[in-house]
Image (cartoon, rainbow, N blue to C red):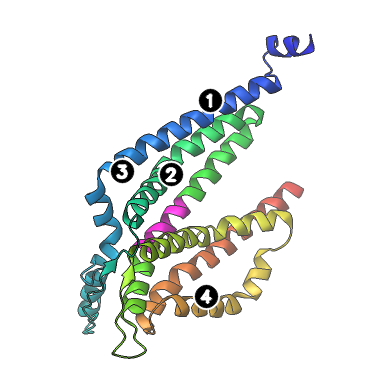
């Protein structure tokens, strides 16, 4: 009797919530499957895009060479030809399916976030909804920035260095397709997470673990740590080291600004 009263008064029962959740998951899965099938069909275009960073004539190398030439520095990346191989019978087919699924989830992520937001929005206040919209947009934007940073800068430069590095001239490098795709997706995901630094700083700041003064105090240490990380994932070249270090350190400075705004807002609310 109570469940009927709750249902007629506009409140969903537990069973009705599960039904809404089931329909939402079905819609998300349907969208992902359709996108995966489309991506799977356009095999050539998909892998031309994914395999482009492993070529020595990738657009990033050409742009860097052009910029350095304008600055009066004759910088040239060594040409290389590293073949990608497949060592298992089903490896290429399974890689094709995996790539199609991952790209489908990435392309469908705005729709997935929208569906999740629609599911939880009934229990949110209007101010919380506006704040959730803003945070979601910021998180997604930062993730895309990390993705582009990985695709156009970090991965091609790292691949160029690691694939051409030799302990001896007699040892030739041949990279498996699975290794290439695994490294590409892992590095891209990690950069997407790294670019969430301002969001993590905001959350930790709201929880009282850090503040702008603390991050300013350890700014020099953070810069050194970022340079060390950049040196590990890039070739031993000062230009590429700077190219990777500056954006990541810029996120650290952005985090300080975010925390400073957060502290100012808290102090004004207290007054």
Q: Which mark is residue 39?
A: 3
Residue receiving disc 1: 23
Is there a contact, CB below 8 Å, between mark 4 and mark 2? no
Instruction: Identify the residue position indicated by label 2 in the image.
Output: 105
Q: Picture quarter containing residue 128?
A: top right
Assess whether mark 2 and mark 1 are in contact (beta carbons under 8 angstroms).
Answer: no
Asked whether residue 125 is in view, the answer is: yes
Q: Is disc 4 surrounded by few (<14), some (14 to 19) or many (20+) residues within 10 Å?
A: some
Q: Are marks 3 and 4 in contact (CB under 8 Å)?
A: no
| Residue 226 disc label | 4
Residue at the spot 44% in from the left edge and 68% down from the top edge: 247
Q: Nearer the viewer, residue 4 or 69?
A: 4
Q: Are marks 3 and 2 in contact (CB under 8 Å)?
A: no
Disc 1: CA contacts within 10 A as few (<14), some (14-19) or many (>=20) = few
Report the disc number at residue 71.
Answer: none
Position of 45 with respect to 197 (left or right) is left
Real-space Cα separation, disc 4 to disc 1, in angstroms = 44 Å
Q: Which residues are magenta?
A: 141-151
Out of 73 and 140, give the one closest to the viewer: 140
Question: Residue 208: which quarter of the image?
Answer: bottom right
**Residue 13 coordinates in the image, percent (x, y):** 70, 19
> In this view, which residue lies farthest toward the front?
89
Dot 3: few (<14), some (14–19), or many (≥20) neighbours within 10 Å? many
Q: Between tags 4 and 2, which lies in front? A: 2
Q: Position of residue 160 (x, y in %)?
A: 31, 75
The answer to whether residue 18 is above or below residue 252 is above
Mark with earlier residue (3, 2): 3
């Amino acid at each position: 009797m109570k469940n009927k009263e709750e249902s007629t008064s506009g409140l969903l029962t537990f069973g009705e919530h599960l039904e809404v959740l089931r329909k939402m998951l079905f819609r998300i899965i349907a969208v992902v499957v359709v996108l995966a099938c489309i991506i799977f069909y356009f095999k050539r275009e998909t892998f031309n895009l994914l395999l482009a960073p492993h070529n020595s004539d990738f657009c990033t190398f050409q742009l860097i060479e052009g910029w350095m030439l304008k600055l009066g520095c004759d910088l040239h990346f060594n040409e290389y030809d590293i073949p990608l191989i497949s060592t298992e019978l089903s490896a290429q087919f399974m890689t094709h399916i995996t790539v199609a699924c991952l790209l489908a989830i990435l392309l469908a992520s705005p729709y997935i976030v929208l569906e999740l937001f629609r599911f939880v929005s009934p229990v949110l206040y209007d101010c919380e909804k506006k704040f959730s919209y803003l945070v979601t947009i910021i998180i997604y934007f930062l993730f895309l920035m990390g993705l582009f940073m990985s695709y156009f800068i970090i991965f091609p430069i790292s691949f160029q260095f690691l694939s051409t590095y030799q302990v001896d001239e007699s040892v030739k490098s041949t990279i498996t397709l699975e290794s290439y795709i695994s490294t590409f997706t892992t590095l891209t995901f990690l950069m997407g997470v790294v670019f969430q630094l301002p969001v993590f700083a905001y959350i930790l700041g709201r929880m009282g673990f850090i503040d702008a003064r603390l991050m300013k105090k350890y700014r020099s240490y953070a810069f050194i740590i970022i340079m060390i990380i950049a040196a590990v994932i890039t070739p031993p070249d000062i230009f590429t080291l700077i190219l990777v270090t500056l954006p990541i350190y810029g996120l650290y400075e952005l985090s300080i600004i975010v925390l400073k705004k957060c502290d100012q807002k808290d102090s004004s609310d207290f007054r």
